[in-house]
Amino acid sequence: MIIPKFGTKTDHSGLGHKDNLSGVHQEILIAPKNWFDTIAKPVIFPNDPTFTGTFAQMQDTVTIADDHIFKVGEGFLPLYLTFDTGAYSAEANTVYDKTGKKVSLKGFYAGNDIKTMALLENAESYEWIVLFKFLNDLHTGGAYTQLGMEGLFAKIFATFATGTTTGDRLGYSIDIQAYIPRMYRYTGTPTLAP
């Protein structure tokens, strides 16, 4: 049995004097699975025969380093979320002898322009790869977090409401869900749609 290395005595000692901004950046990137030629995979999986459990390999199990390759003329679509509506959660599976996480990215898209309406009203029929950044990663040049992967794609659900004249906004409440083995950081360079 492999005994994994999870770091040294100083690797997990807290924030120190680092920032810890909560929330999600207002722009997320989405692309349906049929736009990809190659969907990059994590650097290594724990069940890989070359996995020995070093600390570097433990970090590689949650890192997607290669670029996703798109079909000609395709790329990620930026999707705007209203400030302070984006929230991400990764719920651990608490059933014995089972692993994985149910992940959810929620946010609000204000308005009902025809182009975005066409996207969000049809999004549920497709499977997606989604990239986004935590606010804490913006000023450090940090990696994206990825929802969905080959065989376990994300689903986008959008609910529309008008709100009231003096109450809430008109637009779409978005809930992007996926079930994945673990949280993944995408360190590749995302290609944007032309």
Image (cartoon, rainbow, N blue to C red):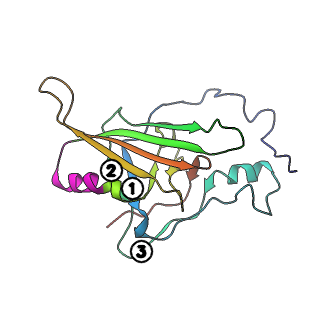
Looking at the rendered structure, the kind of residue marked 2 is Leu
Looking at the rendered structure, the kind of residue marked 3 is Lys
Q: How many residues crowd mark 3 within 10 Å: few (<14), some (14–19), many (20+)? A: few
In this view, the residue farthest toward the front is 96
- Magenta-highlighted stretch: main secondary structure? helix
Nearest to N terminus: mark 3 or mark 1: 1
- Residue carrying label 2: 79
Q: Which structural element holds mark 1?
A: strand
Answer left or right for 117 relative to 91: left
Q: Please name the residue shown 64% across and 35% down the image.
A: 94
* 117 is within the stretch colored magenta: yes
Per the model, the C-alpha gap separating discs 3 and 1 is 15 Å
Q: Residue 71 carries which label?
A: 3
Q: Give the range drawn in magenta.
A: 111-122
Per the model, the C-alpha gap separating discs 1 and 2 is 7 Å
Nearest to N terminus: mark 2 or mark 3: 3
- Residue carrying label 1: 30
Nearest to N terminus: mark 1 or mark 2: 1
Q: How many residues crowd mark 1 within 10 Å: few (<14), some (14–19), many (20+)? A: many
Q: To which quarter of the image does residue 98 belong? A: top right
